[in-house]
Amino acid sequence: MSTLRITLSGLYLGSVMQNVIHFLNPGDALTLAQAAADVRDNWADKMRNAHASGFVYTNIAVKNLSDLTVQTFNLPYAAAGVGEPSAPHMVLAILITLRCSAAGRRGRGRVYVAAPRSGWVSNSQMTGAGMSFMQANVIDPITTRFVGAGRTSNLELQVYHADTNSSSNVVSLTLRQYLGVQRRRNINVGI
């Protein structure tokens, strides 16, 4: 059983945008290449629905945190967002909360989805239509694939605790109506 750190990288307005997510790989059933392909086909491909067309994925990196002697696997991935172009708001992001069964800070994590579609944003929050579409076409399929005992993937979504090198199973994903802000995604700030 290993814990995998998967880093999805992309470009938006010439700046690198990254999301780091963690998965448990029970029984080491998947190789790093298989894990990267699973995340590409069932996470990134779903997330493309949330991104404006100016956002382009570039790479998926998989690191085995349980065996640091194993070299990181990189899967080149060139795929653009499918949404309408958006105004250049580099720091705005759709916010997804990852919930675990534990209470407090150890029981939650976040995913900031860069370059939200402009038709989904009004007054710094997501529209009802955007929320509905995102729930049905992104959150629900990702939950079915990677969360809980009935998941369809061998990979299980986790919240990783760097201070103890441990992780907790995610039990639900919640889409937030208010947009998040990632200042480090701004021009000349860096990731």
Image (cartoon, rainbow, N blue to C red):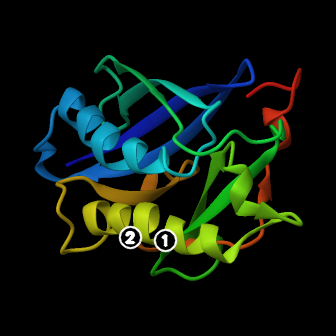
Q: Nearer the viewer, residue 47 or 160?
A: 47
Q: Which residue is mark 2?
A: 140
Work out whether mark 1 precedes mark 2 in sequence or the reverse, and give the earlier one. 1
Q: Quadrant of the C terminus?
A: top right
Residue 108 vs residue 59, the one in the foreground: 59
> Do we see residue 165 in this rendering?
no
Residue at 87% from the left image edge and 25% from the top image edge: 187
Horizontally, residue 17 falls left or right of residue 82, namely right
Q: Residue 37's spot in the image, x, y percent?
A: 25, 34
Q: Visible in this render: residue 31?
A: yes
Query: Dot 2, crowdedness within 10 Å: few (<14), some or many (≥20)?
Result: some
Name the residue carrying label 1. Answer: 135
| Secondary structure category for the residue under label 1 | helix
Q: Amino acid at mark 2?
A: Asp
The answer to which of 65 and 76 lies nearer the viewer is: 76
Q: Which residue appears at 28% of the width and 73% of the height?
A: 148
